[in-house]
């Protein structure tokens, strides 16, 4: 069970792929409203159990906005 709390790494995956992977570790979903944003590639090492921190960090790096709602983080440009 320790692997569920560890870091999760991405290198060249799209935002959509990474959001799907992060969803495996949390009930909080990442919703990407912009198809172009969903296709952006990302890289980095993130805490698997922190989808809000993950979304905020990537949003900042891609000049997007992350809005936290009940059970989801919604990303827009």
Image (cartoon, rainbow, N blue to C red):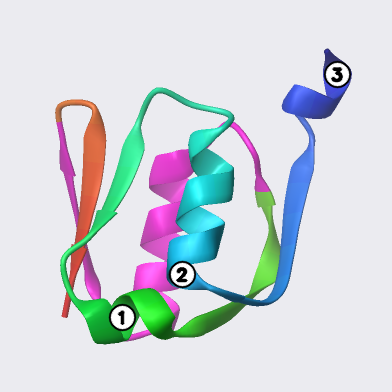
Question: Please, what secondary structure does the residue beneath circle 3 have?
Answer: helix
Task: Give me the residue at 48% from left, 37% from top.
Answer: 23
- Quarter of the rendering occupied by the C terminus: bottom left
Of circles 3 and 1, the one toward us is 1
Q: Is residue 46 positioned above or below 42 on the image?
A: above
Residues under numbered marks 1 and 2 in contact, where contact means CB atoms less than 8 Å apart: yes
Left or right for 15, reference 63: right
Residue 21: image x %, image y %?
58, 47
Judging by the rendered image, the residue that carries numbered circle 2 is: 15
Question: What is the secondary structure assignment of the residue under circle 1?
Answer: helix
> In the rendering, which numbered label is found on residue 37?
1
Q: Residue at x 40, y 56 (%)?
A: 55
Q: CA distance from mark 3 to mark 1?
A: 32 Å
| Residue 50 image label | none
Left or right of 23? Residue 34 is left
* Residue marked by disc 3: 2
Which residue of the protein is positioned furthest toward the top in this rendering?
Answer: 1
Between 75 and 38, the one lying in front of the other is 38
Query: Going 58% across and 29% down the picture, which residue do you hit?
Result: 25
Magenta segment: 47-69
Q: Earlier in the sequence, mark 1 or mark 2?
A: 2
Return the residue nearer the eye: 30 or 67: 30
Q: Nearer the viewer, mark 3 or mark 2?
A: 2
């Amino acid at each position: 069970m320790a692997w569920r709390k560890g870091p999760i790494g991405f290198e060249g995956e799209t935002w959509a792929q990474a959001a799907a992977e992060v969803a495996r570790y949390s009930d909080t979903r990442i919703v990407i409203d912009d198809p172009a944003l969903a296709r952006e590639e990302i890289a980095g090492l993130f805490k698997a159990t922190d989808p809000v921190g993950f979304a905020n960090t990537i949003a900042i790096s891609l000049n997007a906005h992350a809005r936290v709602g009940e059970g989801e983080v919604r990303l827009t440009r």
